[in-house]
Amino acid sequence: MTVTELVSYEDALASYDPVMGLEVHVELGTRTKMFCGCSTALGAEPNTQTCPVCLGLPGSLPVVNATAVESAVRIGLALNCEIAQWCRFARKNYFYPDMPKNFQISQYDEPIAFDGYLDVQLEDGEVFRVGIERAHMEEDTGKSTHIGGATGRIHGAVHSLLDYNRAGIPLIEIVTKPITGAGERAPEVAKAYVAELRELIRALGVSEARMEMGQMRCDVNLSLRPHGTETFGTRSETKNVNSLRSVERATRFEIQRHAAVLGSGGTIVQETRHFHEDDGSTTSGRVKEEAEDYRYFPEPDLVPVAPAREWVEELRAGLPELPRLRRNRLREEWGISEHEMQSVLNAGAIDLITATIDAGAPADQARKWWMGELARRANEQGTELSALPITPAQVARVCELVADGSLNDKLARQVIEGVLAGEGEPDEVVEKRGLKVVSDTGALSAAVDEAIAANESIAEKIRGGKVAAAGALVGAVMKATRGQADAARVRELILEKLGVQG
């Protein structure tokens, strides 16, 4: 089905209620793999970070990564889950080139964490609770690169290259309970949930959760049911969606596609689907297996995991302040609205602003520069704020130079430009570019005299009581000093020389 055959989103929601299930895979930031000592570092030559265990060679035996287990427990606690007193791994059997063992070590009916929830805040401030079915440990697969096809997928490829460096990297898969009741806001809820989950994972320090690098991936399960019915429809599963915007777009597209199929008398096929970034559409992948198709059975080479209750409670006590609570606290401290905080969150600026305040900047000034000049530059460059080559400490120094009168806003923007261009620290840029505010009374007085002499008619208006006209003379002085004059002091001198009270 093509995009042009979709029903409108409004028509889809007029007849059906969407039901979602979101499965998020998170690569844990451990130094070694889930069941062996191979490095997880990125960027190595293909197939150089492998060993008999992660390649599944006969006679090799896995050993569980203790740090990965701790990370899984901390994630489960942060998601308000129950932590299993006893759980074990299972073999998930399927045959695909990126599975060196032809099975994946995962957890099936005995996950380490289960029955939790995550509250997510939508853009208008509404809080929506998403139930968590389970969070379980498993290992990642290898990476396939398909050569010669038009789409980069296996279909139509001439040959494929396999890199097993990623095989065995620790994963946590977080599976929601069926998400109902979101209605027309289902795509927004899906996006907000993944965004909140990403912030939580980062706050715990267990992963960088960079979606663009595949460290966090979302599978979007969606079905529709006619209004007034309780039975769920047949679901599709859009695999490996790797940005917040794409999660929202994939959900919306599938709602429209399902509605179009059902409305025309067709039936939904239970299948996996591929998401296409270019037009926001999805296309069929393969028929979706049921659990029994994977022939799960307990992993015979691993002992069960039984987290001690005392240890679990120690981990609970050591959890950091969770993102939504932290945002609410910061919003009150900064004195901004929920809408303004949402904008800060969307820009990825919370940690940057906080670090700038910690470096000595006032909250309003830190927010002003990150959400204004720096956000504009990041936008122009198509990059994240955090990727800009400027530190919170450098932004705090710019704020300090403005506060002590060494810079005005115009000059501060030039200093930021210099820092971003690699010209050094803010003070070095000021020195190299000669950007300090001209505050010398003698120099300013001469510039004011010249402006008055060149604009006598405006001076007469000011003498006549039209004080607002002083802005034109201030502008003339600022131009003459290349924007480096102290505008407030210039205005004082103008009025003083013309014998007018400000």
Image (spheres, rainbow, N blue to C red):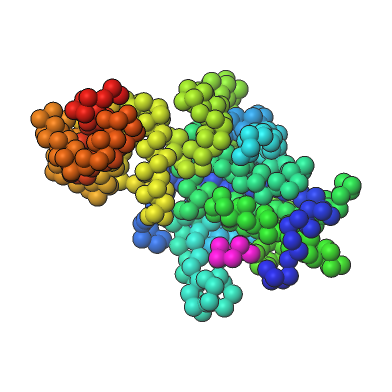
- Looking at the figure, which quarter contains the C terminus? top left
Residue 384 spot, x, y in % from top left: 42, 48
**Vertical placement of residue 221 versus 28, above or below:** below
**Vertical placement of residue 195 versus 466, above or below:** below
Seen from the viewer's position, the closer of residues 73 and 476 is 476
Side of 429 where 349 appears, left or right: right
Residue 253 spot, x, y in % from top left: 68, 59
Seen from the viewer's position, the closer of residues 215 and 329 is 329
Q: Measuring 57% from the left and 78% from the top, which residue is drawn there?
A: 156
Residue range (magenta): 276-281
**Vertical placement of residue 77 versus 183, above or below:** above
User: Was residue 241 drawn as part of the magenta stretch in this picture?
Assistant: no
Q: Residue furthest right?
A: 228
- Looking at the figure, which quarter contains the N terminus? bottom right
Residue 235 spot, x, y in % from top left: 76, 56
Q: Measuring 64% from the left and 64% from the top, which residue is drawn there?
A: 281
Side of 152 where 88 appears, left or right: right
Q: Measuring 27% from the left and 39% from the top, which residue is drawn there?
A: 458
